[in-house]
Image: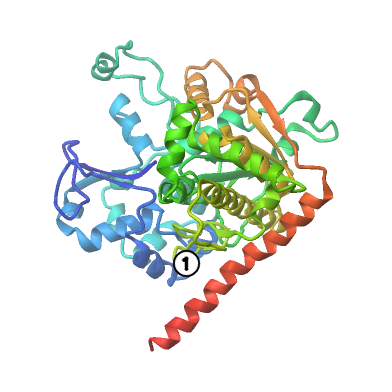
Amino acid sequence: MVLAVAVGADGSPVSVSWNGDSRRDIIVWMDHRAADQAGRINSQNSVALQFYGGGVYPEMQVPKLLWVKENLQESWSMVSRWMDLGNWLTYRATGDDTRSLSHMEQWRESVSRDMDGADEDFWVEIGLEDLYNGSNKKIGHDVAFPGHPLGSGLTPASAKELGLLPGTPVGISLIDAYAGGIGVMESVPDEDFKSDMSDEEAICHRMVLVCGTSTCHMAVSKNKLFIPGVWGPFWSVMIPEFWLTECGQSATGALLDYVVQNHVAAPLLANQAASQSVSIYELMNKILLSMSHEQNMPFLSALSQDTHVLPDFHGNRSPVADPKSKGVICGLTLDTSEKQLALIYLATIQGIAYGTRHIVDHCNAHGHKIDTLLACGGLAKNSLYIQEHADITGCKIILPRENESVLLGAAILGAVAAKKFSGVHDAMKALNAAGKVVRPSSDPRVKKYHEAKYQIFRSLYDQQLSHRSTMVQALQ
């Protein structure tokens, strides 16, 4: 996902790169160049920051914009519009500059809804007051909720480029993960519907995991829930009339790729996987199953008893909100075999799942009632990944019938904009459908094992904080 597109007065791209290349007109979400700016923004202690868990994170738009202003002044002066990629695409398609509730706009909408004037005061406090020049043109003046149709649909020029009819309805865009939420959140089997709850209450017991390069964890509520270290609450940004809580892990699929590809045994395993026409991850899942049988393990997860992973290789977005957090692999040896790589892979999956448990527990401790997870994205196709998450969180995990849930969510937005449904939630109920349901192991030994490993997982971050403090003092 691209968080910032720099657009010049004539619609041309503006560089946000040191080398001035105008083709480099975007800043991707996982770019952490603005860590210093995020820290200085947070030091203001603005009341507006409560809508981001108490502080902004380097992956957000606001610190990135401040970085550009401070470091690329010429580019800053040339930019006419700062846009989320989805908003830029719909503007390009329709000529309508109405913005969706992307990360910048959702903040403004939620803050202004609660604290009149606090939003503009915040921009002044952090040194970005010039974004308000020209009736907010640079960051958009008008916003709309999901399902809203834009302009008169496709312009003749855009229709010709796309091979579609002029006037074809175009719905307001959404962040890709939010579209995944719309595409999956009502994918609940009939037998799992809670007869003692209204639909409105039942949906508040679910959390969606959009699992790809990173993982976005999303839950909704009817009441505002301010949660330390967690983004939100954001009003109507995903499902109209609900507040959204957004958590996340900045590296999940990317972390598994990194751990596997940087091991000496990876090329050999990749060749073996190719010869069997399976992925390297499917092959490692088979290796782990075989190892558990060979070693007479009570259950597969126990193979990792001596290996523990803190998955913060790109910081911790939620719930500790620490971009300085580092990854840890505890239990390494000189073993370079394929089996050892499979063990590290298993422990990494578990570390990611313990992070999800930390998020779920933290949200529930602050007002949520999450007991069901719905997973989509590339990692949701990995059976071991999903089973470990079910066993570790204690939640059943529902996989949607439609593999491409983000695309389904986008289709729902288009269908609502075309007046095929009365609203987003009605369309979700009609078009979402459940596939497989994965339930936690009923073996009490599995629960006991993961409880012990979870405590070790939590201690790894605490130890890191202690080490960080020790080294800071040593350098004073």
Q: Is residue 405 above or below residue 374?
A: above
Q: Colour scheme of this structure image?
A: rainbow
Question: Where, by quadrant of the figure, is residue 14 drawn?
Answer: top left
> Relative to 253, does residue 323 appear above or below in the rendering?
below
User: How packed is label 1: few (under 14 Cα within 10 Å), some, or many (20 or more)?
Assistant: some
Residue 439 in view in this figure: yes
Determine which residue is flagged by label 1: 46
- Residue 458's quadrant in the figure? bottom right
Vertical position of residue 281 compared to residue 43: above or below: above
The quadrant holding residue 201 is: top right
Q: Residue at position x 14%, y 55% from top? A: 74
Q: Tell me which residue sits at (74%, 58%) in the image.
A: 451
Q: Residue 1: horizontal and vertical position, in percent?
A: 39, 41
Q: Nearer the viewer, residue 404 or 53?
A: 404
**Residue at point 52% right, 45% down?**
215
What is the quadrant of the C terminus in the image? bottom left
Q: SS for tag 1?
A: loop
* Residue 175 seen in the figure: no
Kindly give the residue lying farthest to the right in the view shown. 196
For the residue pair 68 and 294, the one nearer the viewer reads as 294
Percent of width and height locating residue 145:
50, 35
Say left or right for 68 vs 348.
Answer: left
Locate residue 319, reporting x and y percent. Answer: 58, 59
Q: Nearer the viewer, residue 6 or 326?
A: 326
What residue sits 33% from the left and 56% below the top? Answer: 64
Q: Is residue 453 above or below residue 396?
A: below
User: Where is residue 296 shown, x and y percent of the image?
Assistant: 75, 47
Closer-to-camera residue (229/387): 387
Q: Amino acid at mark 1?
A: Ser
